[in-house]
Amino acid sequence: MGDSWWALSWLRGTYFPLSVTDVDTEAGTAQGVRMVSTTHVTVELTEDQVEAVGLPPGHGYQVTGMLLD
């Protein structure tokens, strides 16, 4: 479950729609998108994004905030 274990623990025992966006058969993992109706979002930065803003690599940065229309 990687870094998503805490979010997935909230969903344990529930049913929800999930769109699979990528499958890594070698690692035995799938990446997906779960649609929610909330304005609170957390996005993990890619290494390219971390480099673009000049942060030290390898720290798993996340940006948390509100999505405004």
Image (tube, rainbow, N blue to C red):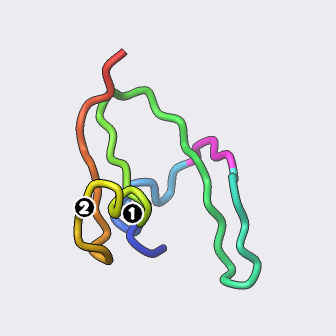
CA neighbours of label 2 inside 10 A, class few (<14), some (14 to 19), many (20+): few
* Residue extent of the magenta highlight: 15-19
Relative to residue 38, is residue 50 depicted above or below? below
Q: Look at 69% across and 52% down and name the residue there.
A: 21
Residue carrying label 1: 9
Tag count = 2
Foreground residue, 50 or 32?
50
Q: Secondary structure at mark 2?
A: loop
Q: Secondary structure at mark 1?
A: helix
Q: Are marks 1 and 2 in contact (CB under 8 Å)?
A: no
Q: Earlier in the sequence, mark 1 or mark 2?
A: 1
Q: Residue furthest top?
A: 69
Kindly identify which numbered label has been placed on residue 54: 2
Quadrant in which the C terminus appears: top left
Which x, y percent locates residue 61? 28, 62
**Label 2 sits on what residue type?**
Gly
Which x, y percent locates residue 28? 69, 80
- Which secondary structure class fits the magenta region best? loop
**Label 1 sits on what residue type?**
Ser
Q: Is residue 33 left or right of residue 21?
A: left
Q: CA distance from mark 1 to mark 2?
A: 33 Å
Relative to residue 27, is residue 42 depicted above or below? above
